[in-house]
Image (cartoon, helix red, strand yellow):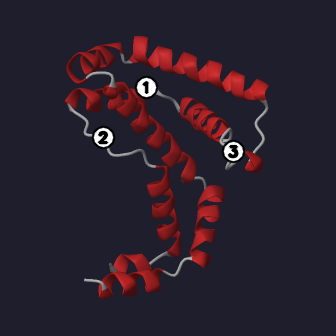
Amino acid sequence: MRYLARSSALVAVVSLHALLAAPAVVAGPYTDDLSKCLVRSTTNTDKTLLVQWIFATIALHPDVKRLATVPDSYRQELNKKTGQLFEALLTHSCVGETRQALKYEGNSAIEASFNVLGQVASRELFANPSVAKGLAELGKFFDAKRVQKQLESSK
């Protein structure tokens, strides 16, 4: 538990990652192979596109809509480019891995593999110095020592 008090920035990053992480999915070896292929087959530009698409889609939710304005025409363009990326990954770059994952582990393998790709792309986004600085701001409002003390006293 002592690691909690070390860095408020670390707490912010871990907290945000926990909020953004997809639910745990038990992946088999074919899903793992597909996930690795998706990550290996995407460029930094592809990963940026994926993060932009995720952001633009999340911005549609009523609870966050007022925080970001994404023009419908831009969202449509992101949908088009992301759809083309997904199609190319599944039918060209990773076609063998896709077939094996579907055959032996079913449709959930596709979702789980794209979750991994999304997490990798998001991790790269959060590594940006400006984003990391923004995450560190959470540390001003988070008392890690208090949390550590409470967790240790409840043993």
Residue wearing tag 2: 25
Q: Residue 155's x, y, as percent?
A: 25, 83
Marked residue nearer the N-terminal end (2 or 3):
2
Q: Quadrant of residue 134?
A: bottom right
Could you tell me the amino acid type at mark 1?
Answer: Ser
Q: Is residue 9 left or right of residue 74?
A: left
Q: Is residue 59 left or right of residue 105?
A: right
Residue wearing tag 3: 62
Marked residue nearer the N-terminal end (1 or 3):
1
Instruction: Say which residue appears at 54% left-offset and 34% top-offset.
Output: 47
Q: Residue 109's x, y, as percent?
A: 31, 27
Q: Nearer the viewer, mark 1 or mark 3?
A: 3
Q: Residue 41's x, y, as percent?
A: 43, 25
Which disc is residue 68 wearing? none
Q: Nearer the viewer, mark 2 or mark 1?
A: 2
Q: Is residue 27 left or right of residue 128?
A: left
Instruction: Please say if 154 is above or below 55.
Output: below
Could you tell me the amino acid type at mark 2?
Answer: Val
Q: Are marks 1 and 3 in contact (CB under 8 Å)?
A: no
Tell me the distance, in whole angstroms, between the alpha carbons under discs 2 and 3.
28 Å
Tell me the distance, in whole angstroms, between the alpha carbons under discs 1 and 3.
34 Å
